């Protein structure tokens, strides 16, 4: 099996190429539920990533983006730090169980080191927690912008270093007290108390066992991102390899996931790990090979197609692996992907947000025309 086939199957799993396997998404919340979590440190880009999966083929992204905004404004989605210390979109109903499974254990284990790094005492954190919770609770609409919370922390002399405010917001979000919710603008969200969110813990998982939650999370990741390896799951979720391997075996025994196969048997990566997929993905791919080969996408910089895996060369190729993050500092470029392969980068420049593509190699006039038409669908806010 060729590496490009793995990339093209991921297009199908992620809902970037429409097919009968991926649900016909009914809402922005449905998209995030299906993906389990969506990379969200670049807010405008993450909003577009969800809108692209929600949008109908050839439709302008404006309506889908409004739907994504509304999902946050209605409390159906939140943005928080559930894994790897990285912001993600989550369904509100999954917030508490997800944090307990992934992030809360980690922050407890790292507490002394983090406090020392930020030159803070436990008493500082306790005081800051009370300040933040009370400030939001007493705000007219029980929500505040980040700058307003920082002002309150400064007023009580709780900002002692450059990153103290970040640590407090990160810490209290992982504790499940606060989350980024309604949008103040396409680039900024209000922080709210999770107790005020209408759908908090409404999915019945509050009393589920850790094993059941692991099965749910890992099944969702395999279905929505496959083909994936055990290390993809470990990197994405920050869970341990031992419990991931056990959970994969349980899911395989239950018939809800399957190993990727070709004529030679189980497909493995360079270090001998097999790829896991939805049981019907390969059959669907066999009927959609031409569709995925013709696909053309303008992806935001942190889209899950690039960020959801430890090995990105299936899509970038080895020769262009560093193109998407040239400074190696985690600042990812917006990409042009044709048939599952990286062919260029794009930006919106100037006050008029002029679309500017930069191709990695010469492309046909037809591809250039298709790219220009896709650019017309992009938001210019």
Image (cartoon, helix red, strand yellow):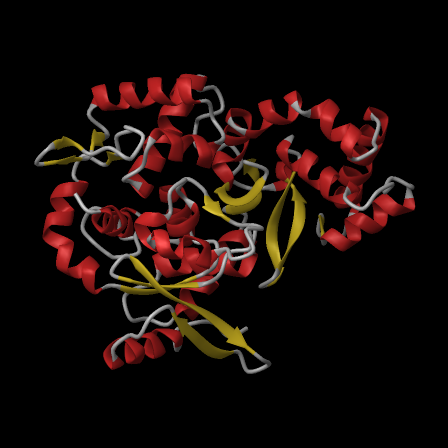
Q: Where in the figure is residue 24, as x and y percent of width and height?
A: 27, 53
Q: Which picture quadrant has residue 279?
A: top left
Task: Give the position of the C terminus as an image quadrant.
Answer: bottom right
Q: Nearer the viewer, residue 246 or 188?
A: 246
Residue furthest to the left in view is 263
Q: Where in the figure is residue 193, as x and y percent of width and height?
A: 67, 40
- Residue 76 higher or lower than 232, as above or below: below
- Residue 103 higher or lower than 79, as above or below: above
**Horizontal placement of 269 versus 378: left or right?**
left
Q: Where in the figure is residue 185, as x and y percent of width and height?
A: 62, 64
**Horizontal placement of 108 versus 76: left or right?**
right
Residue 26: tell me if it is visible. Answer: no
- Residue 27 higher or lower than 108, as above or below: below
Residue furthest to the front in view is 319
Residue located 51% across and 74% down the image = 348
Residue located 58% across and 51% down the image = 329
Q: Nearer the viewer, residue 26 or 285?
A: 285
- Residue 113 higher or lower than 280, as above or below: above
Task: Give the position of the N terminus as an image quadrant.
Answer: top left
Q: Where in the figure is residue 39, as x and y percent of width and height?
A: 49, 47
Residue located 39% across and 31% down the image = 231
**Horizontal placement of 295 versus 43: left or right?**
left
């Amino acid at each position: 099996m060729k590496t490009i086939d793995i990339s093209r199957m991921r297009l199908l799993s992620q809902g970037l190429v429409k097919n009968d396997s991926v649900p016909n998404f009914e809402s922005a919340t449905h998209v995030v539920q299906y993906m389990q979590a969506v990379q969200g440190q670049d807010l405008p880009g993450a909003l577009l990533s969800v809108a692209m999966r929600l949008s109908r083929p050839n439709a302008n992204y404006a309506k889908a983006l409004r739907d994504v905004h509304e999902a946050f404004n209605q409390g159906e989605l939140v943005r928080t730090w559930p894994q790897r210390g990285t912001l993600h979109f989550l369904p509100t109903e999954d917030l508490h169980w997800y944090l307990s499974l992934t992030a809360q254990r980690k922050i407890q284990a790292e507490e002394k080191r983090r406090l020392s790094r930020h030159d803070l005492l436990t008493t500082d954190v306790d005081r800051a927690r009370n300040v933040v919770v009370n400030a939001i609770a007493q705000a007219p609409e029980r929500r505040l912008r980040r700058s307003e919370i920082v002002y309150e922390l400064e007023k009580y002399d709780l900002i002692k270093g450059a990153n103290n405010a970040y640590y407090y917001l990160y810490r209290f979000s992982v504790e499940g007290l606060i989350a980024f919710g309604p949008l103040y603008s396409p680039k900024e969200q209000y922080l709210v108390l999770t107790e005020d969110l209408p759908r908090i813990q409404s999915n019945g998982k509050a009393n589920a066992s850790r094993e059941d939650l692991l099965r749910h999370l890992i099944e969702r990741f395999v279905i929505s991102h496959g083909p994936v390896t055990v290390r993809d799951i470990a990197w994405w979720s920050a869970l341990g390899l031992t419990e991931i391997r056990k959970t994969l075996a349980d899911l395989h025994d239950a018939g809800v996931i399957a190993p990727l196969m070709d004529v030679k048997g189980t497909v493995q990566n360079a270090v001998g790990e097999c790829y896991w997929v939805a049981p019907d993905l390969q059959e669907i791919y066999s009927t959609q090979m031409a569709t995925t080969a013709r696909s053309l996408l303008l992806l935001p910089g942190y889209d899950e197609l690039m960020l959801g895996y430890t090995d990105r060369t299936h899509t970038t190729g080895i020769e262009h692996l560093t193109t998407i993050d040239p400074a190696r500092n985690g600042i990812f470029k917006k990409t042009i992907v044709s048939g599952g392969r990286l062919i260029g980068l794009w930006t919106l420049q100037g006050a008029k947000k002029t679309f500017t593509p930069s191709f990695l190699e010469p492309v046909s006039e037809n591809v250039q025309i298709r790219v220009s038409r896709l650019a017309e669908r992009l938001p210019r806010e």
